[in-house]
Amino acid sequence: MKRFISGFTSENENRPKKRDLFSSKVGVIAAAAGSAVGLGNIWKFPYEAGNNGGAAFILLYLFFIITIGLPVMLSEFVIGRKSRSNVHGAFHKLAPGSKWPFVGYIGILAAFMILAFYSVVGGWCIQYVIYAVSGTFTNGTSDEYCFIFNNFITSPIRPIIWQLLFMAISAGIVLAGIKKGIEKYAKILMPLLLVIIIILDIRAVTLKGAMEGLSFLFKPDFSELTGVSVLEALGQAFFSLSLGMGAIITYGSYVNKHDNLSNTAGEVTIADTLIAILAGIAIFPAVFALGIDHDQGPGLVFVTLPEVFQAMPGGFIFSVLFFTLLVVAAITSSISLLEVVVAYFVEEQKMIRRDATIIATALISIFGMICSLSLSSSVKIEFFGKNFFDWLEFVSSNILLPLGGLFIALFVGWKLGKQKVLKELSNEYTINAPFYHVFIFLVKYIAPIAIAIVFLNGIGVLKYILMIFK
Ligand code: TRP
């Protein structure tokens, strides 16, 4: 029996030529959707939308998902399956002797930075499972939930312990290989998470005063958008779909040659976007009905949802289930980040898988600890008004991922060549690739130009460039 991702297992650590493949099409989708669906959908998307004015941000986000996210995801699958390599090795193989492999370094740096703060938030979720189990969310006010959250994340030691546990679990899975059991569980647990979110949605939209939240979500006011919020929407599209740093290249390298890449990319994108929107519907009606600040940032979900649980029958069970599944969703994402670094260490630095995993985990955990401490009231590490946590998040999502995505699109659109792309999309001309021309057009022109404009505008450089042309 083939393993879920046997490319993850130690048995082929020194035989990179004999990379094994995902056992089935469902396996690919489960792994890629597992990577995409995570804290980005349930924790980050709602607070980004809340900070950036709601509906206008969401519409832009959807627009970027379709015009940039989907084509970049397909590009990553093409690069990965064609090269059957890690991020760095993939460019090396497909463009030998060129400078392209530096895109791999952007990816590895991004993986480090993202995992550093991701593991901190993953640790918060573990703490919230414990709060839920001990009945903390049965009778509190939003002020109390706010206090519990702030008190917890600013304490120096407790969040670090959970963060390290989160990293250890991720490392354990990457090290051991994702066994058949986990494939089976993920296939049950992720749909269960979806069901719970839908139940939360029903409760949230039937709260008194929910309408205001729905109109915040769906009635756009474009005057609220700034250059930075457009960049945030782009960064969020990349972050949520796990794009721009080679996670999908790495997973793509384990995809079977008979799988239909276009369909896979489409299905993963739809699942991921659906879950983000449903999470927004669970949160904003409640935020407005309960008078919670919608622009409070990373604490939004942790302060709002406890109140929703409290206001529903069976809230105790639902809160335990929800936070447990959130931890599972976060783990299936974090392993994809860790795998990018580990695959690189194994294939390019010729380390054995165990050492690669231990070294990557240790290095990232050190960054993660600094990141967690930067929130602590006693330490406070800040530059230019942002703490280390916010910096890691901003630079990785809004700078490194769009840059990585830009190069990935350019690579497929201009370097790889139409014929090679068509061959890959059509599985050597055995299946139809009806959207092939649209895809080439998007990766060749639309995605790179759009990313460049949004990026230069977001970092405040565009206005100077436009001045030159005036
Ligand atoms: N997409 C995941 C989420 O939404 C996070 C993630 C996993 C990620 N792998 C990634 C983000 C690669 C960017 C790049 O939670």
Image (cartoon, rainbow, N blue to C red):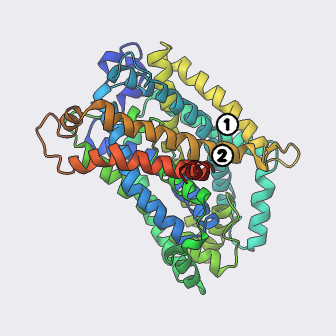
Q: Is residue 105 left or right of residue 179?
A: right
Of residues 200 and 425, the one nearer the viewer is: 425
**Is residue 465 placed above or below 105 in the rendered structure?**
below
Report the residue at 31% width, 16% height from top. Answer: 17
Pointer 1 and pointer 2: residues touching (CB < 8 Å)?
Answer: yes
Residue at the right extreme, as displayed: 378
Residue at the front extreme, as displayed: 470
Residue pointed to by mark 2: 123
Residue pointed to by mark 1: 164
**Residue 24 at what x, y percent from top left?**
26, 39
Distance of label 1 from label 2 (alpha carbons): 8 Å
Q: Is residue 22 left or right of residue 280?
A: left
Q: Amino acid at mark 2?
A: Gly
Residue at the bottom extreme, as displayed: 208
**Residue 259 at what x, y percent from top left?**
22, 40
Q: Amino acid at mark 1?
A: Leu
In what quadrant of the picture does the C terminus appear?
Answer: bottom right
Inspect this view and state whether residue 109 appears: yes
**Residue 40 at what x, y percent from top left?**
54, 53
The image quadrant that residue 272 belongs to is: bottom left
Residue 251, labelled with which disc? none
In what quadrant of the picture does the N terminus appear?
Answer: top left
- Identify the element where label 2 is drawn: helix
The image quadrant that residue 304 belongs to is: bottom right
Report the residue at 61% width, 65% height from top. Answer: 52
Q: Is mark 1 within 8 Å of ligand 1?
A: no
Q: Is residue 117 left or right of residue 219?
A: right
**Residue 215 at what x, y percent from top left?**
53, 80
